[in-house]
Every structure is written in C-alpha cells, then in structure tokens.
Amino acid sequence: MNARARGWAAGALAVSFLALSCTTAKKAVPTGIVWNTAYDATLADAQANHRPILLDFYTDW
C-alpha cells in the first residue's frame, strides 16, 4: 500500500470514528438543581453517585 492510499485509509477511519462518536447516546440531563441542607446525607449521596458537591457559605453581617 503506498503512502497516498494509507492517507486516504487513515482519513476514512478518522471520519468513521467521528461519525460514530457523534451518534452515541448521552447521559440524561437533570431538569433542575436540587439543593440539600443536610451535609451528611448530601455527602453520602455524592460519594455513591460519584458527583461533586458545592458548599455555599454566607452571612448577614
């Protein structure tokens, strides 16, 4: 196989991978954010589902 044929084959392979990756199913997007106030329950849920948590601190000084 000459260099030009290998180039075409590599290009066709790359386009095939790109096309297949665009058609794979994605994860469902949540409809909204659920805010939890119980730290221990939230931390356990985040660890079980491999998700990060956001700690929001504020004060009324």
Image (spheres, rainbow, N blue to C red):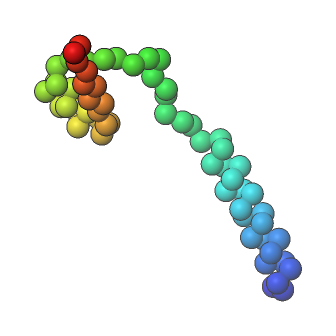
Q: Which residue is nearer to you in this view: 6 or 55?
A: 55
Name the outermost residue toward the front. 61
Q: Toward which corner of the image does residue 26 lie, by quadrant?
A: top right
Labels in figure, total: 0
Residue 34 appears left or right of 32: left
The quadrant in which the N terminus is found is: bottom right
* Towards the viewer: 32 or 4: 32
Furthest toward the right, the residue is: 4
Q: Residue at x 63, y 48 (%)?
A: 21
- In the rendered image, the quadrant that contains the C terminus is top left
Residue at 30% across / 30% down in the picture? 54
Residue 43, quarter of picture? top left
Give the residue at x 45% y 22%: 30
Give the x, y percent position of residue 3.
82, 84
The residue positioned 49% from the left and 33% from the top of the image is: 27
Q: Is residue 4 above or below residue 44?
A: below
Q: Residue furthest left?
A: 40
**Place of residue 11 in the rendered image (x, y in percent of width and height, measured from the top left):** 78, 66
Outermost residue toward the bottom?
Answer: 2
Please tell me in which quadrant of the rendered image residue 34 appears.
top left
43 up-or-down from 6: above or below: above
Residue 16 % position (x, y): 72, 56
In the image, 26: left or right of 1?
left
